[in-house]
Image (cartoon, grey):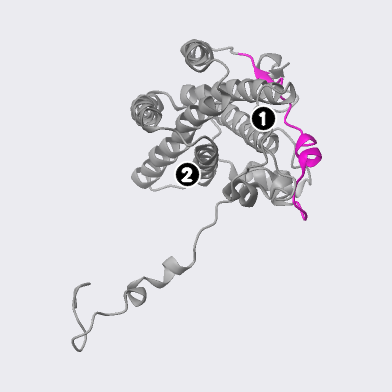
Amino acid sequence: MQSANATINGKEPDVIHQIPEDLFYLHHPKPVRHEILESKTPLDSKALENIDISPDLHRQPVTWSDKIAFYTVRILRIPTDWFFKKKYIHRAVMLETVAAVPGMVGATIRHLRSLRKLQHDGGWIDHLLHEAENERMHLMTWMRISQPNWWERSLITLVQGGFYNMFFMLYLISPRTAHRVVGYLEEEAIVSYNSFLKEIDNGNIENSKNVPDIAIDYWNLDKNTATLRDVVLAVRADEATHRDTNHHFADRILVGHEDLREDIKRAFEDHDKTKKMAGLTNEAPEKWKWSK
């Protein structure tokens, strides 16, 4: 077999023909909200504001695992608030650097477990990878808007490396606690983005129309009217999805029912996509319910 650097009839080969056929089918990241995926027209500010995200939802910590996750996240917020104060764009860059890690870690560990046990993963891996990709798109968007300098990029590398290793160990020890941590991190993310929106609405942060193409394409924003505020609304909606998903994953581990497939199939057959599942029904103990 000829090497990649071999010549054919004394000429360099056409490199494009050496690319495997499968690589020509480029993957285009898709958003996580069905309101965005199913929209027939570009989304303006009103459409984004109408997405129901229940911003005040909070999952009450009940077990020791829940409480460890909750108070760990609350403690981590203290130095973050002190360091960034009201620099919300820079805060968003750091937030998404961390947020893009858990989905990839969870997917990796569950992928390896599936291989070891020679059994289906229950439908988690694809969702976790989608979450990681979604958070990465958040980061790519904020990077284009903020253009961080060299020391901020160094801080991003340091924080990402430290958080990845800590979260990897946590997921190995207690996946339920790991998902609960992510659920509470997303709750705090929504709080931060609410404050971000308030600063824009109060005129303290310019509602710029210099929105990068990556954001317009990804969230199907109206390119003629898209503003920084629209980006914040879209990102906040995504974080609400990850909040709900990770708390649900933690609850599934708690009740020992991790396979999504049968529950989702039953929900579609019953034509009720909003029904709570696996220990999260209306008959579940009051202590497991959400609160405002």
The numbered disc on residue 22 is none
Location of mark 2 (residue): 121
Q: Which residue is the extreme one toward the bottom?
A: 9
Specify whether residue 59 is painted magenta: yes
In percent of width and height, residue 3 lies at 19, 73
Verify CB contact (< 8 Å) between mark 1 and mark 2. no
Mark 2 residue crowding within 10 angstroms, few (<14) / some (14–19) / many (20+): many
**Cα distance between the residues tagged 1 and 2:** 45 Å
Q: Which residues are magenta?
A: 39-60
Secondary structure, mark 2, is loop
Quadrant hosting residue 145: top right
Quadrant containing the C terminus is top right
* Principal secondary structure, stretch drawn in magenta: loop
In this rendering, does residue 179 appear at all? no
Q: Residue at x 36, y 74 (%)?
A: 16
In percent of width and height, residue 162 lies at 34, 25
Specify whether residue 221 is painted magenta: no
Looking at the picture, tell me which residue is in the foreground, 111 or 86.
Answer: 86
Q: Residue at x 67, y 43 (%)?
A: 33
Q: Residue at x 77, y 44 (%)?
A: 44
In percent of width and height, residue 238 lies at 63, 36
Secondary structure, mark 1, is loop
Q: Is residue 93 above or below residue 5?
A: above
Q: Nearer the viewer, mark 1 or mark 2?
A: 1
Location of mark 1 (residue): 206
Looking at the picture, tell me which residue is in the foreground, 174 or 100.
Answer: 100
Kind of residue sitting beneath label 1: Glu
Q: Is residue 220 above or below residue 248?
A: below
In this rendering, does residue 100 appear at all? yes
Looking at the picture, tell me which residue is in the foreground, 220 or 65.
Answer: 220
Quadrant containing the N terminus is bottom left
